[in-house]
Amino acid sequence: MHSHSNAPALALRAIGMHPKYAGYGYSLAILRITHRHPEYIYRLPKMVYPRIMELFGCTRSALDRNIRFAIERTWENGNQALLSQLFGAFGTNWTPTNIEFISVMTDFILHGSFEDPSSDEKLQAEAL
């Protein structure tokens, strides 16, 4: 497992998710947990979501809605080449579910291009 603690934020930035969305913060917090504990991917609704709801003081519906919104905006305005590479089958016609998104992003963080991200340029070059 990769130990770079900033890898989840770098991954979200690489795909073009904007920090101005509440869903970015929720996604980042979830990815920080699944980065450390990939096995939690299979227990997101039961183990991870309650932690995030407590941390941010939000409801389950707000959590889901805001993550979905951030994913949709990223699909519209993000790094299309990288999104296509990571999510392939989803393309531009539809977006992954929240859990599919978290699962793919966790895999990307653990096994992707974040071994030694010394600069944004290097990160983007490796990600493509």
Image (cartoon, grey):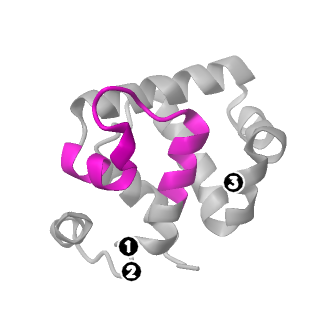
Where disc 2 sits, the SS reads loop
Crowding near the residue tagged with mark 1, few <14, some 14–19, many ≥20 C-alpha atoms within 10 Å: many
Q: Residue at x 31, y 75 (%)?
A: 117
Q: Amino acid at mark 3?
A: Ile
Lower position in the chain sequence, tag 3 or tag 1: 3
* Distance between the alpha carbons at the discs numbered 3 and 1: 20 Å
Quadrant where the C terminus is found in the figure: bottom left
Lower position in the chain sequence, tag 3 or tag 2: 3
Residue 107 vertical placement versus 67 (above, below): below
Where disc 3 sits, the SS reads helix
Q: Nearer the viewer, residue 64 or 91?
A: 91
Which residue is disc 2 drawn over? 115
Residue 79 vertical placement versus 85 (above, below): above
Q: Tell me where residue 88 appears, x and y as whole percent.
A: 34, 48
Do residues under tags 1 and 2 come within 8 Å of each other at their CB atoms?
A: yes
In which image quadrant can residue 16 be found?
Answer: top left
Q: Residue at x 57, y 52 (%)?
A: 103
**What segment is highlighted magenta in the picture?**
80-106
Asked if residue 88 lies left or right of residue 76, the reply is right
Q: Amino acid at mark 1?
A: Phe
Which mark identifies residue 41?
Answer: 3
Asked if residue 61 lies left or right of residue 1, the reply is right
Magenta highlight on residue 4: no
Q: Amino acid at mark 2?
A: Glu
Magenta highlight on residue 88: yes
Q: Tell me where residue 61 appears, x and y as whole percent.
A: 68, 18
In which image quadrant can residue 54 be found?
Answer: top right
Q: Residue at x 31, y 26 (%)?
A: 93
Which residue is disc 1 drawn over? 114
